[in-house]
Amino acid sequence: MEDNRNFILAIVLTIGILFGWDFFYGAPKRAVQQIEAAKIEEAQKDQQFEAGTPDMASGQIEVSGGIPGMAPAVIKEITEGRSDVINERNNVLIDGDRIKGTINLKGLRFDDISLKDYRQTVDKNSDNVNLLNPSVAIKAYFADFGWIGDGTKPDSNSIWNTNSRTLTSDSPIFFTWDNGEGLLFSREVSIDENYMFTVKQRVENNSTEAVTMATYGRIYREGGIEGPAMFILHQGPLRVGDEGKEEITFKDLQEEVFEKEEVTEGGWVGITDKYWLVALVPDQDKKFVTNISHTAQNGGDQFHVNFATKGAAIAPGASIEKTSRFFAGAKEVDLLDYYTEVGGIKMFDYAIDWGWLHFITKPIYIGLDFFYHLVGNFGIAILL
């Protein structure tokens, strides 16, 4: 009788698991896939929005310490695929040790980055993971940097000059843009052997009047996560500042704007996925403010993550330079630890969501990773 009860109980539990799995996971996943397919079809037939540039007239920016806002979107027709858009631009190449892509001389956006070490499927011949996409492509996802303040400034339509056509881990690249009113803007971009860019922005005031300038950086993303959210893993915007790490879900962001006052002891802001991270890292020794917001247009969601530095006066004949960093790559534990400990980026290793019990889960991961590299098999590593 006891064996029969156990057998019947096992059958009931098995049926419960099967139906529960389909109810809580299978059906929502299919619904999300249908919605995503409808959005893509709609976008292909209709239009795509391009994010604007920070606008002083928008009322969302204060040069003394405010945050760049997103100007009204510009409707843009999608007539070509991602590769066609990129191939028709006037690009410089990105050929890092672990990153490849292009930078368009129009606007200097980081909107075409692929990861050399990671592929879209387990097939070794599949395409590399495309982390960032141009603004006129489906699922636009890009980052850019610029200036806020007096005078005419470069924007997404500005054509820059360059001293080179290829950016490598050993060869930085230098860009210039003259506003024709006495202000000369320059930008030096370099990349290390992994996924970290360094962006040095400089403005020279050759006019007869003093100007006030501040720098900004921003990330624009069309759409949130693909598939249902994972309870044990944060995916979405996050930032680190004086109060530690703040995780914000895409869903929460659709209902609220998350603003923060000046940060004085370093930090960063970005968007994280299950495996990937795109992050803005301002100068860790300077004050800055951050803004994370959401807009909804054309039946889709747009997520904005920004930072801005404090404004500084530039006298005639003088210049100022601001340095920021930009990460676009895989969330590798050892690498994030390196940027935290050696690179001096506050809590950058917390880009990985270790959960509330991080003091247990991270050591477990370290042990599992050690045994995996020792035996080459995750199953045996788990047993060990």
Image (spheres, rainbow, N blue to C red):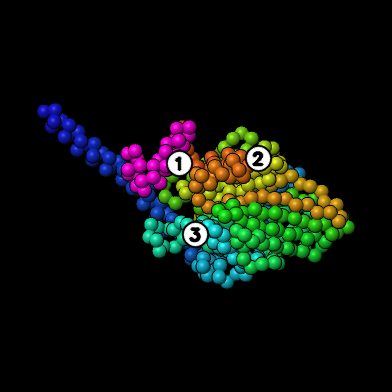
Q: Which mark is residue 322?
A: none
Q: Which mark is residue 266?
A: 2
Which label lies toward us, 2 or 3? 3
Most common SS among magenta residues: helix
Of residues 142 and 256, the one drawn nearer to the viewer in this rendering? 142
Of residues 12 and 296, the one drawn nearer to the viewer in this rendering? 12
In this picture, which residue range is highlighted in magenta?
Answer: 358-384
Within 10 Å of disc 1 (Cα), the crowding (few <14, some 14-19, many 20+) is few
Query: Which comes before the other along the chain, label 2 or label 1?
Result: 1
Is residue 294 at least partly visible in the picture? Answer: no
Does residue 373 belong to the magenta stretch?
Answer: yes
Marks 1/3: CA–CA distance: 25 Å
Q: Quadrant of the C terminus?
A: top left
Query: Which comes before the other along the chain, label 1 or label 3?
Result: 3
Circle 1 SS class: loop
Which label lies toward us, 2 or 1? 2
Circle 2 SS class: loop
Q: Residue at x 56, y 53 (%)?
A: 195
